[in-house]
Image (tube, grey):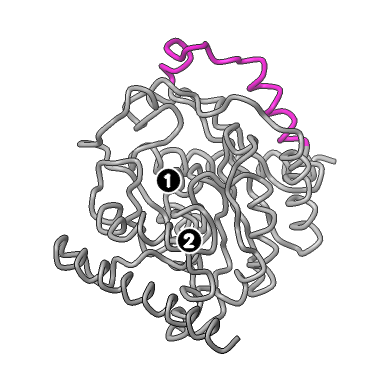
Amino acid sequence: MKTFLKNIFLFFAFSLLLFICILFCYVLKTGVTIHEIPPPYLSNSYSFNDKVLFSHNKKADILAIGSSMSLNNLDSHTIIEELNTNSYLNIGAWGLCMKDCFQLLKIYTAIHQPKTCIISSNLTDFEQKMINIKYEGLKDFLLSDTNQIYKYHLKYFNARYYSKYFGYSKIVKQQKDIYEFLGYDEYGAVLFDSLHFNKSIYRWLNPGFEKLHENQYVYLDSISIFCKSNNIQLLFFQSPFRAGLYKESVPRLNIAKINEHIQRVKKIITDNGHEFVNSNNNTWEDNLFVDGIHFNSIGAKLYTEYCFKQLKLINNKTTSKTTFN
């Protein structure tokens, strides 16, 4: 038995030494440093892991949550100006659906309860996603000391993940003209270059969704109820499609399906006393986008400004009705 355990120990020691040697050679060859080590493996989504690392020990009264529709389409400076606060954090990440948003909101609220939650969304957020998140360790990680982060690298170590993404940070933090760009502003948003972006023809013609799933509406309802129960103001912004997509997409956009979705989401949000803005009521020119649904930096600013302008109009109408009655 002792011999067996000794052999097992030697095997793992040799494997670890071999891995370190390979890593060292890779660093020498590519120039990648310790700072390009991937964030802890808290999910199978690099974007989510990186955003969680960015959000580590951050607390804010205004919270933006969601997929890239929140990450890329919300202009941080417009939000802090409109809400008159610097206490803002965007925890959006690629591919999050309503189920993920609900789970993440609950965890964040257990750490610090926001006053306002903003969700910018499109139909793509109501599809079934393949992101697997280790929720059981997420709260502890967000609250952990900075010098304890290494523990989560060890606890959730995944050799395939580290070998795939080692050095990836160097690319996504510096290349501003790619869809994978993750150069956050101080609040966690990523705005795409409006002049020199490397657009994909496929993404330019893609509406971003195929099949909507019923359970995502159930989770949106859970978000709406949770915010109401916890006195959190929920602002839901329906993000638009670029104008040309209505003519160019293959197959053509199903306008009836889009409108049905919008009305259903609006009812879920407003039934719980929250506020809903449908930006599809406006025309959004193609030069404001990097693909069918993601704005560039100029588009994100105009979209965010539009949503807050519509909120003011909604509130003014509500006040007028109350006064008249």
For residue 312, side relative to residue 180 (left or right): right
Looking at the picture, which amino acid does disc 1 mark?
A: Asn
Q: Which residues are magenta?
A: 243-267
For residue 124, side relative to residue 68 (left or right): right
Give the quadrant of residue 186.
bottom left
* Tag shown at residue 49: 2
Mark 2 or mark 1, which has the lower sequence index?
2
- Asked whether the residues under the numbered discs 2 and 1 touch, taking CB atoms below 8 Å apart as contact, a structural biologist would say no
Tag 2 secondary structure: helix
300 drawn magenta: no
Q: Which is more toward the observer, 91 or 33?
A: 33
Q: Residue at x 26, y 53 (%)?
A: 171
* Tag shown at residue 72: 1
Q: How many marks?
A: 2
* Tag shown at residue 90: none
Q: Which is more toward the observer, 201 or 322?
A: 201
Give the quadrant of residue 35.
bottom left
| Quadrant of the snapshot with the N terminus | bottom right
- CA–CA distance in space, label 2 to label 1: 17 Å
256 drawn magenta: yes
Give the foreground label among 2 and 1: 2
Give the quadrant of residue 122.
top right
Q: Residue at x 46, y 43 (%)?
A: 305
Q: Which residue appears farthest toward the right when viewing the image? A: 325
Q: Residue 65 location in percent, x, y?
A: 57, 54
Tag 1 secondary structure: loop
